[in-house]
Amino acid sequence: MIEDNHSFIFPKGEKLSSNWFTGDAFLTPLLARDRNNDFALGSVTFEPGARTNWHTHPRGQVLMVIEGKGWYQEKGKAAQAIKKGDVVNIPENLEHWHGASASDKMVHVAITNYKGEENVVWLQPVTEGEYEKVNNNQ
């Protein structure tokens, strides 16, 4: 099936770096940080199997899932299934990852707060074993 980009709320955007993402993930910036807003806002599309590395946000992040199904996992805890309509409030400096399920695409809007000039600290990739365990336990 060919995707009709016009049926989505936001365009798919530009491919994100494999330094911080596994698989095909794309970003459409929606609002840049400015003097009125100490956050960045963007739509992130994760193709099936795509996910972030483990990472933290010095002042937290909010995810609003607008399409599909995926996963959110905090270090040391079981992964949570997330789907269209879910909102995830991520506390500051909490190690976590998020992305699509192995079989479904997932799109979320991310609201990422800044602390000084920093809004994310990238860590190691989610291993294939960690990801397979999450998807096999669904």
Image (spheres, helix red, strand yellow):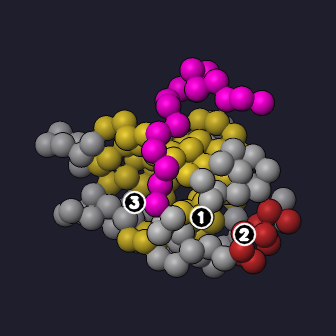
* Residue found 57% across the figure and 20% down from its top: 6
Place of residue 30 in the rendered image (x, y in percent of width and height, measured from the top left): 37, 36
Label ID, residue 34: none
Q: Disc 1 to disc 3, how far (Cα)?
A: 22 Å
Of 59 and 66, nearer the camera is: 66
> Which residue was labeled with disc 1?
22
From the viewer's perspective, is 91 left or right of 133? left
* Label 3 packing within 10 angstroms: few (<14), some (14-19), many (20+): many
Amino acid type indicated by mark 2: Tyr
Q: Main secondary structure of the magenta part?
A: loop
Contact check, label 2 and label 1, Cβ < 8 Å: yes
Residue 61 vs 121, above or below: the answer is: above
> Which residue was labeled with disc 3?
60
Which of labels 2 and 1 is toward the front? 1
Looking at this view, name the residue that lies furthest to the front: 2
Amino acid type indicated by mark 1: Thr
Residue stretch rendered in magenta on the structure: 1-17
Of 30 and 38, nearer the camera is: 30
